[in-house]
Every structure is written in structure tokens, then in C-alpha cells.
Amino acid sequence: MAPSKLIAVLPGDGIGPEVIAQATRVLELYRDRRGLPLDLWPLDLGADRYLRDGTTYPEAVRARVAGEASAVLLGALGDPRVPGLEHARDILFGMRFGLDLYANVRPVRALSDRLVPLRDRGARDVDMVVFRENTEGIYVGMGGQFKRGTRDEVAINEDVNTRKGVERLVRAGFEYARAHGKKRVHMADKSNAMRHAHELWYRVFFEVAKEYPGIDARHVYVDAMCLFMIQDPSQFEVVVTCNLFGDIVTDLGAALQGGLGMAASANVHPAVPRCCDERHEGPRVAMFEPVHGSAPPLAGKDVANPLASFLTVGMLLSHLGWPEEERRLEGIVARAIAEKKCTRDVGGELGTRAVGDWVLGELAHAF
Ligand code: NAD
Ligand code: IPM
Ligand code: MN
């Protein structure tokens, strides 16, 4: 038998545990009924644990994730009882930065015309993938505060962009486009205002683009991109952008998909050609999470939409070598929408668990 793949499962806060409970049932079904060699490792980390004993992302867990796990499935982190979000930053950034998961891959794909809120537009118009740089930008936490609490206070967050960081993300976008038959890659920046940092993005993007002659490389300012995403999202196929803009445009993208309950994501480290120090042996551990957060007002009410977490499991299984299961799960999720076997945010009347029951039933029949 193939050696089993260790999947760390971190439900987290708010609606995280509710949607991840359903996603876990899907993984268990794959393990028990389909025979996939999956070993699930539940992680009791998040706001409750932090408030209980101060633990955020302990070294022993960090080491086992990095050394033994094939993937992490994460729900969401963020709890009003921890206003500084210390635990969320330690865990989320601990994984994204610590595992060097430099590409946050966020498909913006609508699975039904009914979910697209734009007049005269349908699912065929909303089919893009955003490659968000995931290890740099303003997220690195460089900066500080000075004279805090006085009228003269100063607050600075540095925007860190490196040649290596920009180039590998841009290459990952082009490689994806080439592998998936996409004809166009956009790079979204603010090089008109951020003259230093985003001049680097602009220059590197068009330099790398020369190596992909069959692909139409286009620059767009991110503010204009927000406009175009609403006016005509069909022009976007693959988008590469920095950490902060990727975060923002994918919530806008989620609105085109039917809301945050429909948006999945993968935090990965693609091995791209000619980029730096790729000496790592074998596939790296990657982290998979729905795009949404912990949605505190929805928590504990059985109303959270679990479909994004199923699509996220699909991305995870594809990453581990079972791409057909991503397509299968996406097909079932599309049917859940078509047949209104879904939660209220996407036009159904079911609760979180009942959607899970229906999806599990469909999946059980698929094998
Ligand atoms: P959010 O994504 O939690 O919620 C935004 C909106 O989307 C809300 O109206 C919410 O009800 C709706 N929504 C989100 N997920 C849904 C689902 N599965 N089903 C139905 N509706 C859904 O964003 P927020 O309110 O800005 O943030 C809440 C907390 O989550 C904050 O602490 C934030 O920092 C954190 N957060 C964490 C992650 C993560 O862990 N990856 C991502 C985003 C936000
Ligand atoms: C996301 C979230 C996080 C981010 C927050 C919780 C720090 O919004 O994963 O999209 O900005 O990356
Ligand atoms: Mn976000």
C-alpha cells in the first residue's frame, strides 16, 4: 500500500470548526470508502486554546507539519475575544511564511449563472485564477509605531518586495497559464503611485513574459482592475499580484462567485524554472483554506456555507495527486447549487450539516 499522507486539520475559530467538520467527513469518506491513504491529524489550535493556555503555534506542531505532513486543511482564524489576533497571525503567517508557501492560488470561478450578481453576465464570464504573492509585501510586519497615543504619533508598515519573491510568483502564474491552456496573464499593481516597489513588479513581469511568447501579458492598475472585474470579468484568466491586492481582489472575486461561502484557496510553493534555489526534494507541504474568515456573527448557528471548504478539499486532493477528485467535488458542489441543496447565502434553505449530508450522499454514490 502507498505510504499514507498526513493531513493536519486545523478547524480554528468561529465558523471554521463547522465547515471543517463537514470537510473532514469528505476526507474520511475518501479514506474509508475510496481507500485513499490519508491520515488525519486534528490540531486543537485557535482562539479557545490561546485563551486557555496562551498557546498559538507551538514548536512541536510546527516541526511535525514541516517534516511529516503532506498538507494542512485550515478553517479560519479570528475571534473578537482576541482583538490583537496574535494567535491568528502566529498560525496563518507561521504556515505561509514558515513553509515558504509563496503562492496563494485563489480560483475565482462561478459554478452557476444564478450566483453571478452582475446584470447580463453568467458563470461563463467568471473564470479566473488569482496568484497572490503570499510571503512578502506589507504582511511581513516590518515597521513600528513611534510616540504612540500622542498627537504626534507615527505608524509605519513597510512594503517589502524582493526580486526573488516577485519573479517566482510571476513565473508561477505564467507556468499555470501555459499548463492550463490560458491565453492571457494580467499583473495588477499600483506602479503609478508605488514607484519603487511596483516598478519592480512591472519590470519583472514583462521580462518574464518574454519567455512565454504565446501568452498575452497585460498590465492593469489594481484600482482599474476592480472596475473591470465588475464591468467585464471575462477578460481575466490568470492574475498575478502582490499580497495585499491579492487579498482584496479575491474578496471582490468571491462576490462574483456567489459570496465568500464559495471561494477556495491553496497556499503552495510551486517549483518554477530558473527561479533561485529550488533544491527541495519531493513535494512540499501545502496549506489549504477557504478564502472566508471566521464570520463570528454566523458561528454556532449551523448557517455557514460549507461549499468553499469542499472545493478547498478538492484543491488539496488535486495537489496530492488526485486531480480527478477536485473535478468530482466541483461537479457535486455545482449540483448542490443547481438543486438548491445549499445554505441561505446561496439561495437554499439547508443548514451547514444538512449540506454536508447531501454532499456526502452524492459522493458515496460516485464510487
Ligand atoms: P469573513 O470572511 O469572516 O466574513 C465576511 C462576510 O462573509 C460576512 O458577511 C460573513 O457572514 C460572510 N461569510 C463568510 N464566510 C461565509 C460562509 N462560509 N457562509 C456564509 N457566509 C459567509 O470576514 P470578516 O468578517 O472580515 O472577518 C472575521 C474574522 O475572520 C476576522 O478576525 C478576520 O481577521 C478573520 N479572517 C480570517 C481568515 C483566515 O483565517 N484565513 C480569512 C479572512 C478573515
Ligand atoms: C485571508 C485573510 C488574512 C489575510 C487575514 C486574516 C490576515 O484576510 O486569508 O484572506 O489578509 O491574508
Ligand atoms: Mn482575506
Image (cartoon, helix red, strand yellow):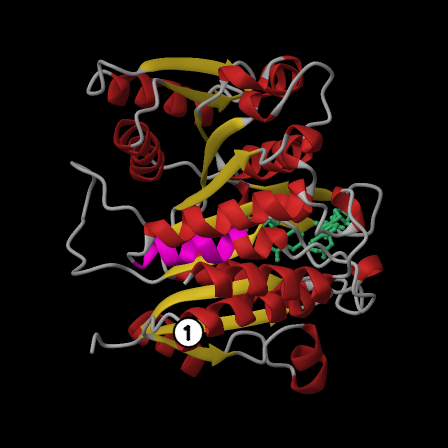
Q: Is residue 279 left or right of residue 81?
A: left
Q: Quadrant of residue 239?
A: top left
Q: Quadrant of the N terminus?
A: bottom left
The magenta-colored residue range is: 311-320
Left or right for 93, reference 356: left
Residue 359: where, in percent of width, then height? 59, 59
Identify the residue shown where x is 64% and y is 48%: 336
Q: Main secondary structure of the magenta part?
A: helix
**Residue farthest to the front, as pictured:** 365
- Quadrant of the drawing holding the C terminus: bottom left
Q: Is residue 43 visible from the viewing direction of this image?
A: yes
Label 1 crowd bin: few (<14), some (14–19), many (20+), radius 10 Å: few
Type of residue at label 1? Arg
Name which residue lies at 42% across and 46% down: 327
Quarter where residue 41 is shown: bottom left
Q: Position of residue 365 (x, y in %)?
A: 49, 62
Provide the secondary structure element on which disc 1 rests.
loop
User: Is residue 319 shown above or below 49?
Assistant: above
Q: Nearer the viewer, residue 75 or 323?
A: 323
| Outermost residue to the bottom | 53
Which residue is found at the position 29% from the left and 46% from the top?
A: 270
Question: Up-down: is 102 above or below 193?
Answer: below
Left or right: residue 210 versus residue 298 is left
In magenta segment, residue 316:
yes
- Residue 337 magenta: no
Name the residue located 72 percent from the left edge and 80 percent from the top edge.
Answer: 51
Q: Is residue 53 left or right of residue 96?
A: right
Which residue in the structure is indicated by mark 1? 33
- What percent of the width, then of the height, locates residue 189? 50, 23
In the image, 53 versus 362, the foreground residue is 362
Using the image as rendered, state which of residue 238 and residue 339 is in the foreground.
339
Q: Measured along the vertical axis of the image, is residue 136 above or below residue 58? A: above
